[in-house]
Amino acid sequence: MDRGHVAMFEPTVTFEIEMVKGFSNILFGGEGLFLATLKGPGKVWLQSLPIENLAARLIPYLPASKGD
């Protein structure tokens, strides 16, 4: 799972980032170099967009700041 899709998780869940193994996976995997591993009992909440894309979609709805 892409680490950017993890919204939150209960304290009983362990969250680890691991590097993708295998040279061909790194070159042709298309998912990036790092993946999230979550283990243990408990609930995990995921979001459908990576945090960068989610933030970009929310910006138009935020109030504009008034400049000097």
Image (cartoon, rainbow, N blue to C red):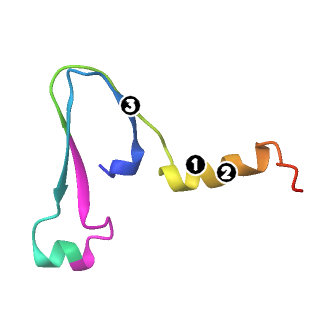
* Callout 3–callout 2 Cβ contact below 8 Å: no
- The span picked out in magenta is 27-37
Disc 2 marks which residue? Answer: 57
Quadrant of image for the C terminus: bottom right
Disc 1 is placed on an element classified as: helix
The numbered mark at residue 36 is: none
Instruction: Please determine whether, in this image, residue 56 is positioned above or below residue 6.
Output: below
* Callout 2–callout 1 Cβ contact below 8 Å: yes
Residue drawn at 53 percent across, 55 percent down: 52
Disc 1 marks which residue? Answer: 54
Of residues 42 and 16, the one nearer the viewer is: 16
In this image, 52 relative to 2: left or right? right
Q: Quadrant of residue 44?
A: top left
> Identity of the amino acid at label 2?
Arg
Q: Residues within 10 Å of mark 2 (few under 14, many from 20)?
A: few
Disc 3 marks which residue? Answer: 8
Q: Position of residue 59 (x, y in %)?
A: 71, 50
In this image, 45 relative to 29: left or right? right
Residue drawn at 49 percent across, 44 percent down: 48
Disc 3 is placed on an element classified as: strand
In this image, 14 relative to 62: left or right? left
Task: For marks 3 and 2, give the CA distance.
Answer: 20 Å
Instruction: Please determine whether, in this image, residue 42 is positioned above or below residue 15.
Output: above
Task: For marks 1 and 3, give the CA distance.
Answer: 15 Å
Task: For marks 2 and 1, give the CA distance.
Answer: 5 Å
Residue drawn at 24 percent across, 60 percent down: 34
Residue drawn at 60 percent across, 50 percent down: 55
Q: Position of residue 53 (x, y in %)?
A: 56, 55
The earlier-in-sequence mark between 1 and 3 is: 3
Q: Position of residue 62 (x, y in %)?
A: 76, 43
* Callout 1–callout 3 Cβ contact below 8 Å: no
Can you name the residue that lies furthest to the front here?
68
